């Protein structure tokens, strides 16, 4: 007979956790822009450096790191400000949320609102050092901080349930 265990956790998302979610979520986009700009600036600088092609590429790449790195810092700062504004405007996210993970799916309760997700509703699952992200679409995820779990055993039970029903 199948084990019908479930895991129930609850908590309130903090601003720092929301910022981390945004940083993880946008990491690939930021790196793509950084390397794209690095290539673009390298090509621009190669045309103005008068040296042997091998030497000019290395110097151009070195010089291209500066504007590309500055752009990356600017984008990260912009994303942090945007995350802070989004978090402060989303009053629903600042309430205590209770999740129950079972063989049937995920039950989410916020105040008097109940939402039920079947496992097939999730497109991907990511684990990070301090939280889990369960994506229901490309840009929308359930943010689940690890601090919501009472102990290591509950966390491991959650992982078993999720791994059984989802691909990472």
Image (cartoon, rainbow, N blue to C red):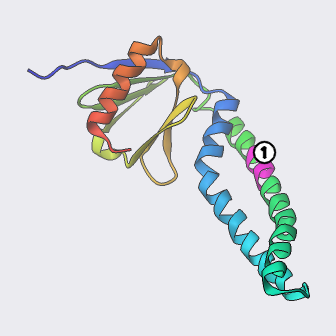
Nearer the observer, 143 or 72: 72
The residue that label 1 is drawn on is: 81
Badge 1 element: helix
Rendered location of residue 163, percent (x, y): 32, 35
Quarter-of-image position of residue 67: bottom right
Answer with left or right where residue 5 lies relative to residue 136: left
Q: Report the number of discs.
A: 1
| Range of residues picked out in magenta | 75-81
User: Compared with residue 69, is residue 38 higher up or lower down, i.e. above or below?
Assistant: below
Answer with left or right where residue 159 lies relative to residue 146: left
Q: Residue at x 68, y 43 (%)?
A: 86
Question: Per the image, is 80 magenta?
Answer: yes
The chief SS type of the magenta part is: helix
Rendered location of residue 122, percent (x, y): 36, 45
Nearer the observer, 106 or 109: 106
Quarter-of-image position of residue 154: top left
User: Compared with residue 146, is residue 83 higher up or lower down, i.e. above or below?
Assistant: below
Q: Quadrant of the C terminus?
A: top left
Q: Quadrant of the N terminus?
A: top left
Furthest toward the top, the residue is 150
Mark 1 surroundings: few (<14), some (14-19) or many (≥20) residues within 10 A: few
Rendered location of residue 65, percent (x, y): 82, 64
Question: Per the image, is 47 magenta?
Answer: no
User: Compared with residue 143, is residue 63 higher up or lower down, i.e. above or below?
Assistant: below
Rendered location of residue 123, percent (x, y): 38, 49
Furthest toward the left, the residue is 1
Nearer the observer, 92 or 57: 57
Q: Residue at x 81, y 53 (%)?
A: 73
Q: Residue at x 44, y 52 (%)?
A: 137
Answer with left or right where residue 118 lies relative to residue 12: left
Answer with left or right where residue 99 lies relative to residue 21: left
């Amino acid at each position: 007979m199948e084990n019908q265990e479930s895991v129930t956790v609850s908590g309130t998302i903090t601003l720092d956790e929301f910022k981390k979610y945004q940083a993880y979520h946008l990491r690939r986009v930021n790196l793509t822009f950084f390397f794209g700009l690095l290539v673009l600036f390298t090509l621009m600088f190669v045309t103005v450096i008068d040296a042997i092609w091998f030497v000019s590429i290395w110097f151009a790449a070195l010089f291209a790191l500066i504007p590309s790195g500055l752009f990356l810092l600017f984008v990260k700062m912009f994303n942090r400000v945007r995350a802070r504004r989004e978090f402060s405007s989303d009053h629903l996210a600042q309430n205590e949320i209770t999740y129950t993970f079972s063989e049937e799916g995920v039950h989410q309760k916020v105040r008097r609102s109940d939402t039920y997700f079947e496992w097939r509703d999730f497109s991907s699952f990511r684990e990070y050092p301090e939280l889990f992200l369960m994506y229901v679409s490309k840009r929308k995820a359930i943010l689940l901080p690890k601090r919501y779990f009472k102990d290591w055993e509950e966390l491991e039970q959650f992982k078993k349930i999720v791994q059984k029903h989802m691909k990472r």
